[in-house]
Image: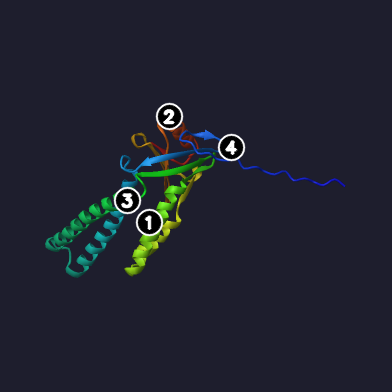
Amino acid sequence: MAENKRKRTVTPEIKYDYRVRLYEDGKYHWMYDLNLLKNPSVLIDVYKMLGMTLLITAFILFMIQACAEGLHFEEMGFALKITGVMAAIFLVLGLLGYLLYAVIAGGEYTVHFTMDENGFVHEQAPRSRKVAERIGCLAALVGIFARKPGVAGSGMIAASRTSMSSEFSNVKKVKALRWMNTIMVNAPFNKNRVYVCDEDFDFVYDFISKRCPKAKIK
């Protein structure tokens, strides 16, 4: 009796290139080296997070002041001064932290992208992943020894989260930032970015835009 031989599915080897290429798996793959000292996109993300923290803190301060002393100009002025000092501190610390990360990462953030008809995956390259894991673990240890669970938790999340995926059907906004070689692809609770070289920028932007029926295209 003849034996039934199962067909083996061979997964094509992905040799990431800086140009966008279609592989045998039916998906587009490419890589991008983001210059952390020339491209401010990551620094902008850092300041956005710090800005949200500042706004929440300022709101709490104003609410406490309003409940305790009422809405008086002098008291509100004091709360504004505190907020201004915090903003200056966040500005300096955010920049110093970013520069430290850039130095540890060797000035580059390398990303691998995989894209098909349904969406794309933004994944840190092995070298950048190791840097992120080290920094995240260091932040977690600092939080533990300083008895600050929020810092420790943020560090552990940063160490474990090395990729982000986006489904085109959920995307609400697509925006091209050509001068930063960046395409913003935002969905509720999932703000993602695509980095791509000049030669393939239009192709990737058009590919994404045409497959996001619910998105506002800019």
Query: Percent from the top left, x then y, of residue 48?
Result: 31, 50
Marks 2 and 4, Cα distance to the nearest angstrom?
21 Å
Q: Please report whichever mark, 2 or 4, sits nearer to the chain's N-terminal start.
A: 4
Name the residue tied to disc 2: 199
- Under circle 4, the secondary element is loop
| Type of amino acid at the residue the image marks with label 4 | Gly
Name the residue tied to disc 3: 46
Q: Please report whichever mark, 1 or 3, sits nearer to the chain's N-terminal start.
A: 3
| Type of amino acid at the residue the image marks with label 3 | Val
Q: Quadrant of the C terminus?
A: top left
In front of the other: label 1 or label 2?
1
Which of the two residues, 70 or 130, is positioned nearer the viewer here? 130
Marks 2 and 3, Cα distance to the nearest angstrom?
28 Å
Residue plotted at (24% across, 52% down): 91
Disc 1 + disc 4, Cβ < 8 Å: no
| Type of amino acid at the residue the image marks with label 1 | Ile
Query: Percent from the top left, x then y, of residue 140?
Result: 38, 63
User: What label does residue 149 carry, if any?
Assistant: none
Q: Please report whichever mark, 1 or 4, sits nearer to the chain's N-terminal start.
A: 4
User: What label does residue 26 carry, if any?
Assistant: 4
Q: Please report whichever mark, 1 or 2, sits nearer to the chain's N-terminal start.
A: 1
Q: Please report whichever mark, 2 or 3, sits nearer to the chain's N-terminal start.
A: 3
Q: Please report whichever mark, 3 or 4, sits nearer to the chain's N-terminal start.
A: 4
Which of the two residues, 211 or 31, is positioned nearer the viewer here? 31
| Type of amino acid at the residue the image marks with label 2 | Glu
In front of the other: label 1 or label 4?
1
Residue plotted at (57% across, 36% down): 23
Residue plotted at (55% across, 40% down): 14
Marks 1 and 4, Cα distance to the nearest angstrom?
35 Å
